[in-house]
Image (tube, coloured by chain):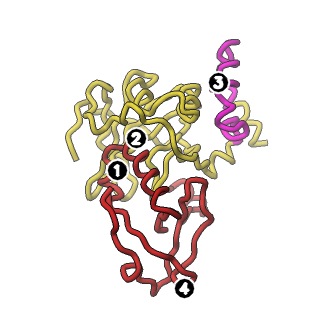
Chain colours: A yellow, B red
Amino acid sequence: MRQIEGFDLQFDFSGFKKMADLVYFDGPFLSHYVSSKGDDYLFYWVDRDDTDNRWLVFRVNLANLQKYIGKELTLRELVANPNDGFLYSVDVDNDLRYHNVKLVQPSSLPEDYLPEPDSYYAFEPIPTVDANELMTYELTIPYKERSRLEELLLKIGFPISALKKVVAHAAAF
Amino acid sequence: MLQDVAKGRSNTSLLALSCFVTEHQAESFYAHLRKAFKNAVISIGDALAEGTLTNEDGMKTSESSNGHFDFYEYENCDLNKTFKITKIL
């Protein structure tokens, strides 16, 4: 696998819960995760060799994720404009161990790690078992409708991550 | 997948053979996949094979709206005899 330019760091992905595989073919290519803090992340597959698969992991605004699912934004726009201004590159080996974690600037990504300019969504989300368990509004409100709800909540200044935690805790009772 | 394995509810789709009903559906899916993942060829190859599946070959899942389904081969099934590579995508 090619070398990628970035800063080495440690990052704990163990608290991430998969909500859906957004692109799947003989395995996931693009997956939506939620961190223990309630933030939305995308795991974007970019490369592999005999022992590892390489993923770019980045925080994403849920409204933008909705726009991607709704074919209003391209995957390239999401990858090139991550919420935090950077992405994590992580290699995952055959035993699902995460290593070689780097903090990467979008401008440092090789061209073959970037989707095409017209990479509009043309797939079907596959929700996970965990998403059903968490009972967040991720699945109780269909993907295409959630952006409007989030936009409304954002307009009135409601913290989205707090809503997720409240719903998750309610589901536990 | 480990999340599901740990809870005893793993999905077997990773073990199935991905198929499409028609050549056009397979080509369309692959074209979209390559736009989003330029290195997809490293993961799934670039050859399109065509053939006919029968009830004696194995079991299939229902088709999704894009024509994709998973196929689980029976132990003695040999698709090399009935499937031929027809195109490099």
Return the residue at label 4: B56
Q: Quadrant of the C terminus of chain A?
A: top right
Query: Which residue is depicted at the point 58% across and 46% down?
Result: A125
Q: Nearer the viewer, mark 4 or mark 1?
A: 4
Residue A23 showing in the rendered view: yes
Q: Is residue A159 left or right of residue B12?
A: right
- Which residue occupies 44% across, 33% down? A75
The residue to which callout 3 is attached is: A160
- The answer to whether residue A161 is magenta is yes
In magenta, the rendered stretch is: A135-164
Residue A169 percent coordinates (x, y): 72, 36
| Badge 2 and badge 3 in a common chain | no
In this view, the mark in front (2 or 3): 2
Residue at image mark 1: B40
In magenta segment, residue A86: no
Q: Chain of mark 1?
A: B
Extreme top residue here?
A: A156
How far separated are the C-alphas under marks 1 and 3? 34 Å
Chain of the residue that carries numbered disc 3 in the rendered image:
A
Residue B21: x, y in percent?
53, 64
Neighbours of disc 3 within 10 Å: few (<14), some (14-19), many (20+): some
Residue A37 seen anywhere in this rendered image of the structure: no
